Structures are given as structure tokens and as C-alpha cells.
Amino acid sequence: MLDVVAVVALALLFGLAVVYAHGCDRLKGGRP
Amino acid sequence: MTQNGWLQIALFIAAVLFLARPMGSYMTAVFERRKTFLDPVVGPCERLLYRVTGVDPDQEMRWTQYAVAMLVFSAATLLLTYVVERLQAYLPWNPQHLPGVESSIALNTAISFTTNTNWQAYTPESTMSYLTQMLGLSTHNFWSAAVGLALAIAFVRGIARREMKTLGNFWVDLTRGTLWVLLPISIVYSLALVSQGVVQNLRPYDTVKIVEPQTVTGTDGKTSTVTTQTIAQGPVASQEAIKMLGTNGGGFFNANSAHPFENPTPFTNFLQMLSIFLIPAGLCITLGKMVHSPKHGWAVLAAMVVLWCAGTFTAYWAESQGNPLLHNVDARVTQTQSGGNMEGKEVRFGIANSALFATVTTDASCGAVNSMHDSFTPLGGMVPMVNILLGEVVFGGVGAGLYGMLVFVVMAVFIAGLMVGRTPEYLGKKIESFDVQMAMLYLLIFPLLILGFASIAVLMPNLGLSSLSNHGPHGLSEILYAYTSATGNNGSAFAGLSANTHWYNYSLAAAMFFGRFMMIIPMLAIAGNLAGKKIVPSSAGTFPVTTPLFTVLLTGVILIVGALTFFPVLALGPVLEHLLMRAGQLF
């Protein structure tokens, strides 16, 4: 059970990191 | 402090500076894909790898693609380590028949080694099989260092390129960093370590009869007589080499580089310290060469040396003073004893090499230790902590040190621009609001994680405080050091903190993860933005980044940012502990 939680948590964390990268990229794009 | 000690410290930094130029020139050739003497040997391996994996080495990546490739690689290798740890009982090369690693430690360790931290909440020789050490951990020592190297090169390309959208190819940088830099040096280095007595085998542990049987009392109050001792073995030399060269720091044994099988002689100790700084120092020269401003590379290296000097001198001085409350102990320096504070230090290394090692390992994001930092005097122990709190930019980790330092360079140039009322420029590139926003994000995530997690641990007695061996300001130092080490991806332990609990395993894992990836992304964003900029011709108002004035400004910015952020907590920890020690109270 803990293994499933660990794998899901890792997937979420790395997914969050990808979203964060695109967020930073969008921040630049949104600049006047 | 002794002349011999100063001589060894001087010899060490002279060797680092002597090797920086050839190392930097070599890495420039490697990452610019020019000819090197290793091409006939590793060139075919590189081409084979690209063919097998389907990588097109000429395909360039935008910074977001570079970041996603790095994240995908890190996630896949992290998962591999986790699975190997959990299943080690069913896998070969486990002569001690060790069971699978418990889930929270397995996760903590997998994140730890993936992020180049190598925080170890376990005792390696009684937890990890040989296969786990080699396939799960040693491989990460190569991969995480190669990732750092690739990221630093990507940042340097961002500075060097003009009006381009790309930073290179992550897979090519990763492969070349591993095959041309880390692997060949590690092979030669491992053999040198073996020649000095570092073990390298796959034998079961030895059991020997001890000369004088010992009567011990267990935690349950029962006494027993110990007549034998287990001596752990293993493939140590091969892991030791990349552990130091890749600024990883995770020991094969729990005692790390204090263990005689990992670091048997003063010569191996010298080699280990030298190898920590070898690549980070060389990368400064690589920076200078790739941006066509060699003097800028030397100016950045000079800032690192200045900060290294300050740390080394402070630690050496503090440890040489010893503990003033030990009235009946002869702490004088003689031909037969080191003098000073020898608690937690190896006699074969003495004060100078212990203080120097502690400074070097925390300047870089290595985290290997040859003495117990928890046993240092309050000010001596503050030095390793401050080194990490400054962002590990004093040489720093493989790649991580240089890109961290370059973020500070962006800030220094920005501040210089504010002082004279001009748009800041860095090597002809205008530093604009997006660059500064990302730099600030990079700089703020670090203290937010350290102070945030440390505050939660301090405020929750059942979670954070119950693991402490010492209370008062020393206890605060132990908690602060743990989160500093994790967030800074250093991995050294202050000790005194029983960190193998669910709270510490998960919270430190989170600190390591966010401290690595949440800082890399804004750094790559700056690099990607810089790569797309035009070069502005320099004028009389351009702030030169090749002069001693720049070195002083850069050093000042690093110290001021660090002091403004962390002085209050340092005042409550090691500074208060030092003052109370002077007043006669120990913790």
C-alpha cells in the first residue's frame, strides 16, 4: 500500500514540477 | 593551529587552482563536442547509446524541453532505485541476506540520491545489499552529477548564445558528461584508492574474535559479553571515487570518510578533498572559455576562493581552540597529539584536515564527512552550516555550484545597475524583469524550505523534538542543519538527530525534492531567456565582470543575502551556544 502511495506521490511531484516549468515560461510570455 | 596544518591547507588550494585550468579546458572541449584524447575509446559508446535510445544528438532543446527531459530522466532513475531497494531481498549480491528496505527509508533514499543529496537516514552496511549499493546508489552518483553538469553547461550556453531559443540537448550533455568526464576519472581514481587500502570486493562480511571481550549493557538492562566483531566489506572503492568526484557524499559505511575502509590514509584524504573541488573549479574556467571571457571565469573562481578561505580559517581556528570548559584535559599541540577539539575527529587526520574537510564538503554539495560535525565547537560547527546556507556556491556541487553562483552573478549585476541607475548588463545581455523575477524565485525557495520545515519540526514536539539528542541551542542547530543539508542537497548530517522517523524521512525527502527541482527550473528559465537576447555593445557605463571589484561585489551580495536571511536563526543556534559555552554551559 505504501508503495502505491509513494509512486503516486512521486508522479504528482514530478507532474507539479512540469507544470511549474510551464508556469515560469508563461510568466515570460505574459510580460508586456 | 600549526605550520604543518597551514601548509597542508595551502597545498590543497594550490592543487585545486593548478588543476582548474586543464580540467576546465577539457570540459569545454567535451561540451562543445570538439576532439579529445578519449574520443577513440568513448566515441563509439556514445554513438551506440544514441542509436539504441533513438536520440538525435543534433536536435536542440528549448529550456522547457531541457527541463522536462531532466525531470523525466530523474523520475525514471528515482523509480528504479526505489524498486531495487524494496526488492533487494529477492535480488542477487546480497550475501548478508538483508531484507527489503522499509518504504519511507526507500523513498527518502531514492529521492536523496536522485537529487545528489545522499542524505542517509539508515546504516548502509546493515540496510543496503551490494546490488542496491551498486545499481541503486552508485549509478545515481554518476547520473545526478551528470545532470548537474549538464544544467550548468546549459546555463553557460544561455549566456554565451545570442538570439537563439535553445540551450543544447539534455541527453547529449548527460551522456558526454558521464562518458568523457565522470567515468574515466572515477576509474583511475578508484584504482588509486585501492592502492591505498580501500576495499573492493563482493565477499560476505568478516567475523573476527576481538582481543579483549567486552561486557555491555543493552537498552533492556541486560548485560552480555561480546567476543566477536563483524567487519563489513563490499565494493567500496568504486563507489568512493564517484561519491567524492560527483559531490554526492553518500558513504558505503555509516562512518563515511571517517571509516578506514573508505578513507584509510592522509593521502586518500587529500585526494578526496581535491576531487570534491576538481570539477566545480574547472567549471569556472569552462564558463570563461565558453562565454569568450576567460577573465570572467577567473573572477568567479576568485569569489569562491575568498569565501572558501573565510570558512576554512574560521573552522580551523575554532577547532584549534578546543573546549574551554575541559580544564583537566591537556589540549596542547605536541608532536604526539593534535591538541584542540579532537572529539569526533580521527587521529590520522587531526584538526587541520578535519576542519578543512568539513569546509570543503559543505562548500561543495558533497556531504561526505571525515569527522562528526555535531562534535565541533559551536563556531566551528557553524561554518559547515553557513557554507550550505549561502547556497553552496563556494565551488558548490558538480554543476549546481556554478549555476547557483551564476544566479548570484545576475543579482550582483542587477544591484550594480541599480547603484548607477543604468539597465544592468551581463556580458552584453540586458538583465530585465523576468530574469530578476526568476533569480528571486531561485533565491527565495531555498530559505522558505529550510526555515519552513525547521519551524514545523521545532513547533511539533512529538514529531520534530522527540528525535533530538541535545536540547537548547544545540538541538536547534541539529534540526536546522538537517533541513539545510537536505534543501541544499548536501547530505551531510550534524548527527545527534535520530532522523529515521516517518516525519523526518518524508519531510526531508520533500525538502530534497523541492530544493533540487524547484530551484533548477527558474535557473533554466533565466538561461533560456538570456539565450534569446541580443548582445549590447559595451560602453563606458557597462559594469565590468572581469575585475576584482566584481569579485568583491559578488562576494558581498552572497554574504549579505545569506546574512539577511539566516542571521536570526544562527543567532538562536550556534551563536547563542557559543556565548553560553563561554559562560560555562554546555548542551
Image (cartoon, coloured by chain):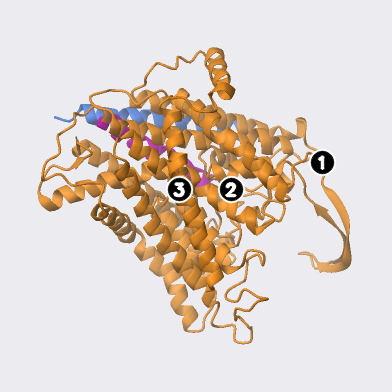
CA gap, disc 3 to disc 2? 18 Å
Q: Going 72% across and 52% down the picture, which residue do you hit? A: B261
Q: Secondary structure at mark 3?
A: helix
Chain A painted colour: blue
Label 3 sits on what residue type? Answer: Thr
* Residue B105 in sight from this viewpoint: no
Q: Which mark is residue B203?
A: 1
B88 displayed left or right of B520: right
Q: Which residue is mark 3?
A: B487
Please give left or right for residue B572 compared with residue B504 in the image: left
Residue B151 rendering spot, x and y as whole percentages: 41, 34
Nearest to the eye among marks 3 and 1: give it: 1
Chain B drawn colour: orange
Q: Whole-Å distance between the Cαs marked 2 and 1?
A: 33 Å
* Helix, strand or loop for the magenta stretch, by majority: helix
Asked if marks 3 and 1 fall on the same chain, the answer is yes
Examine the rendering and report whether any part of residue B331 can be seen: yes
Please say whether residue B509 is one of the residues in the magenta stretch.
yes
Residue nearest the viewer, comparing B476 with B417? B417
Q: Position of residue B246 (x, y in %)?
A: 54, 41
Q: Chain of mark 1?
A: B
Tell me: residue B359, above or below residue B188.
below
Residue at screen point 39% across, 41% down: B285
| Number of numbered markers | 3
Percent coordinates x, y for residue B252 in the rendering: 67, 46
Q: Which residue is mark 2?
A: B502
Instruction: Give, as a single range, the part of the protein colored magenta.
Output: B506-530
Q: Quadrant of the C terminus of chain B?
A: bottom right
Q: Amino acid at mark 2?
A: His
Q: Chain of mark 3?
A: B
- Quadrant position of residue B387: bottom left
